[in-house]
Image: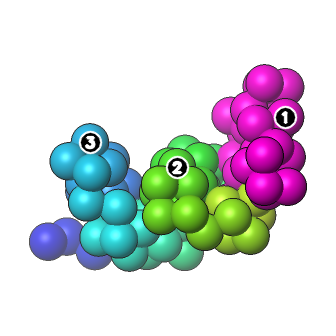
């Protein structure tokens, strides 16, 4: 597999759709590390963490994602999830 941020992100997105969350998280971690300024992998990674029940990491990734920052409903969802609601 090509070792580019885009390739890792595409693989992670496909694995999310297949509900293979652990594998998706690994690919999306690589995508986020390869291009830290790009918000998409952080948002997708937050979705993988949510599915895996990893609240602390999800909150951090969501904070790095423009999708969460620009969508108040996602911010409140993140707070509710992280507070155990």
Q: Which residue is mark 3?
A: 17
Q: Residue furthest left?
A: 1
Query: x and y percent of residue 59 in the render?
Result: 75, 58
Q: Say if residue 45 shows up in the picture.
A: no
Element type at mark 2: helix
Element type at mark 3: helix
Label 2: few (<14), some (14–19) or many (≥20) C-alpha neighbours in 10 Å: many
Label 1: few (<14), some (14–19) or many (≥20) C-alpha neighbours in 10 Å: few
User: Could you tell me if the residues under marks 2 and 1 are in contact, i.e. CB atoms within 8 Å?
Assistant: no
Question: Looking at the image, which is closer to me, 24 or 31?
Answer: 24
How many numbered badges does the structure rendering display?
3
Query: Which label is found at residue 76?
Result: 1
| Image side of residue 49 versus residue 57, left or right | left
Question: Looking at the image, which is closer to me, 14 or 57?
Answer: 57
The range drawn in magenta is 61-85
Sequence-earlier tag: 3 or 2: 3
- Residue 74 falls inside the magenta stretch: yes
Query: Which residue is at 27% across, 51% downward?
Result: 19
Sequence-earlier tag: 2 or 1: 2
User: Could you tell me if the residues under marks 1 and 3 are in contact, i.e. CB atoms within 8 Å?
Assistant: no
User: Could you tell me if the residues under marks 3 and 2 are in contact, i.e. CB atoms within 8 Å?
Assistant: no
Q: Say if residue 53 shows up in the picture.
A: yes
Question: Looking at the image, which is closer to me, 64 or 37?
Answer: 64
Rendered image quadrant of residue 24:
bottom left
Query: x and y percent of residue 56 in the render?
Result: 74, 70
Query: Which label is found at residue 47?
Result: 2
Query: Which residue is at 35% across, 71% downward?
Result: 22
Query: x and y percent of residue 40 in the render?
Result: 55, 45
Label 3: few (<14), some (14–19) or many (≥20) C-alpha neighbours in 10 Å: few
């Amino acid at each position: 597999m090509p070792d580019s941020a885009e390739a890792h992100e595409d693989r992670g997105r496909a694995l999310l759709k297949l509900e293979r969350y652990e594998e998706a998280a690994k690919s999306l971690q690589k995508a986020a590390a390869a291009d830290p300024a790009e918000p998409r992998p952080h948002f997708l990674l937050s979705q993988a963490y949510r599915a895996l029940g990893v609240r602390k990491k999800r909150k951090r990734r969501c904070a790095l994602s423009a999708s969460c920052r620009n969508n108040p409903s996602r911010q409140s969802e993140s707070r509710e999830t992280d507070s155990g609601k």
